[in-house]
Image (tube, rainbow, N blue to C red):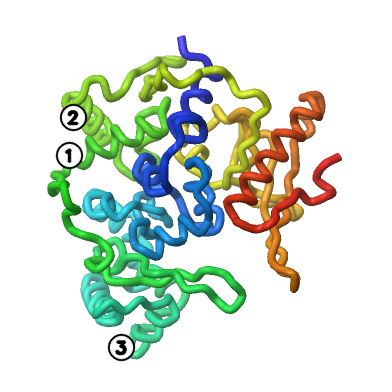
């Protein structure tokens, strides 16, 4: 019988938060299929921490090269998707995304004619290899007679992304050092059929999504997958049936409280010994949290939450369970940038062993500093 601790242990390995980790950020993303990415600085970390030592620069280089694209897909919200997966994933998601957005489209006046005209303007703006910022796209739309402000602008661009007109371009760095997204032509950044791959039918796409979801996030339920992907539970079940017909050994099942969980059994050659005081700093939209809905309770928290009284909203895990919160603050003195981590441990950890906790926390801070490539320390008030 599978116990809650087994669910957590297997999920940590499925999610590559435990060995064997991915060789590159590309591999981490391909395993997870899509990674929620509205908080770009922290989303870089979601990919890098699933590798043996990738850095923020590695992720940014993959985004600039177009191997990793940041676009609206699935529910919809911002996601990282590998360019090899975006063609079939967009084709599978687009009809449901447009239906999900239909109420907002009507409210702000996006009908088929407006969508077609704005798409033509946006396609022209990024033609011949041009990469444009949101502001530059807004200016082009406004010259063509569109208001292109606020929610209207956001949904005109999203409509073009979902329709295969725009994809993310090479980010540019602002004067303050922050990266800003640009947009490029979808066909420039995405090959319709990557080398060695064939065009997937809808049924093949459903099978690919279902199997890859459960292999990278299991143990999880059909409802978890449906809520994560935006698909119906019927489509997820069909994808599972087709995927397991093709490869019956792809997934295993376990029943907990009468509910079936699907997962990929951990490699028996990898040590299954439990972690001793292992701390993971994960962003609040990390797939370890957002990859589940009805079974999110296994990690023991209610993230993501909005910060209260200036409290950090990202999640500190102790051996896979929510045990605090954190955020980073970049400091840019004349001598060079550094980072301070604001970490708030739960009071329930008071008896957990101060020395072991401090060592685990130091290791997590050092790993984050290596990722950023700048000196990183724990804010002095955070350690008592």
**Lower position in the chain sequence, tag 1 or tag 2:** 1
Q: Which labelled disc corresponds to residue 162?
A: none
* Residue holding disc 3: 144
Residue 70 vs 290, above or below: the answer is: below
* Residue holding disc 1: 204
Q: What residue is rendered at 50% in x and 40% in y?
A: 52
Q: What residue is rendered at 38% in x and 20% in y?
A: 265
**Lower position in the chain sequence, tag 3 or tag 1:** 3
Q: CA distance from mark 3 to mark 2?
A: 47 Å
Q: Is residue 166 left or right of residue 269?
A: left
Q: Is residue 67 left or right of residue 289?
A: left
State if disc 2 and disc 3 touch (CB < 8 Å). Answer: no
State if disc 2 and disc 1 touch (CB < 8 Å). Answer: yes
Provide residue 146's location: percent of width, then percent of height.
Answer: 35, 84
* Residue holding disc 2: 242
Q: Is residue 197 left or right of residue 360?
A: left
Q: What residue is rendered at 54% in x and 19% in y?
A: 4
């Amino acid at each position: 019988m599978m116990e809650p601790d087994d669910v957590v242990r297997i999920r940590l390995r499925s999610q590559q938060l435990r060995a064997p980790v991915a060789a590159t950020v590309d591999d981490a993303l391909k395993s997870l299929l899509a990674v929620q990415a509205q908080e770009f600085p922290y989303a870089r970390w979601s990919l890098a921490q699933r590798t043996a030592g990738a850095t923020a620069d590695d992720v940014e280089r993959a985004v600039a090269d177009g191997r990793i694209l940041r676009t609206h897909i699935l529910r919809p919200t911002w996601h990282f998707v590998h360019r090899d997966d975006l063609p079939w994933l967009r084709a599978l998601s687009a009809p449901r995304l447009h239906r999900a957005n239909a109420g907002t489209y009507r409210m702000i006046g996006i009908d088929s004619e407006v969508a077609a005209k704005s798409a033509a303007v946006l396609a022209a703006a990024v033609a011949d290899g041009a990469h444009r910022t949101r502001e530059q796209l807004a200016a082009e739309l406004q010259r063509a007679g569109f208001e292109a402000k606020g929610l209207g602008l956001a949904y005109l661009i999203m409509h073009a992304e979902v329709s295969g007109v725009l994809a993310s371009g090479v980010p540019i760095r602002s004067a303050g050092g922050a990266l800003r997204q640009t947009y490029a032509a979808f066909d420039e950044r995405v090959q319709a059929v990557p080398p060695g791959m064939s065009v997937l039918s809808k049924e093949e796409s459903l099978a690919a999504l279902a199997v890859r979801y459960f292999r990278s996030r299991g143990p999880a339920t059909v409802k978890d997958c449906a809520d994560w992907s935006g698909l119906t539970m019927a489509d997820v079940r069909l994808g599972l049936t087709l995927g397991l017909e093709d490869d019956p050994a792809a997934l295993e099942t376990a029943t907990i409280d009468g509910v079936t969980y699907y997962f990929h059994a951990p490699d028996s050659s990898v040590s299954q010994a439990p972690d001793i005081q292992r701390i993971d700093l994960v962003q609040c939209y990390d797939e370890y949290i957002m990859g589940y809905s009805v079974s999110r309770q296994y990690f023991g928290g209610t993230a993501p939450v909005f910060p209260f009284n200036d409290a950090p909203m990202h999640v500190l895990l102790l051996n896979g369970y929510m045990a605090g919160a954190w955020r980073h603050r970049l400091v840019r003195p004349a001598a060079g940038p550094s980072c301070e981590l604001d970490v708030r441990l739960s009071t329930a950890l008071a008896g957990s062993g101060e020395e072991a906790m401090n060592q685990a926390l130091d290791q997590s801070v050092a790993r984050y500093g290596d990722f950023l490539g700048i000196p990183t320390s724990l804010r002095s008030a955070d350690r008592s």
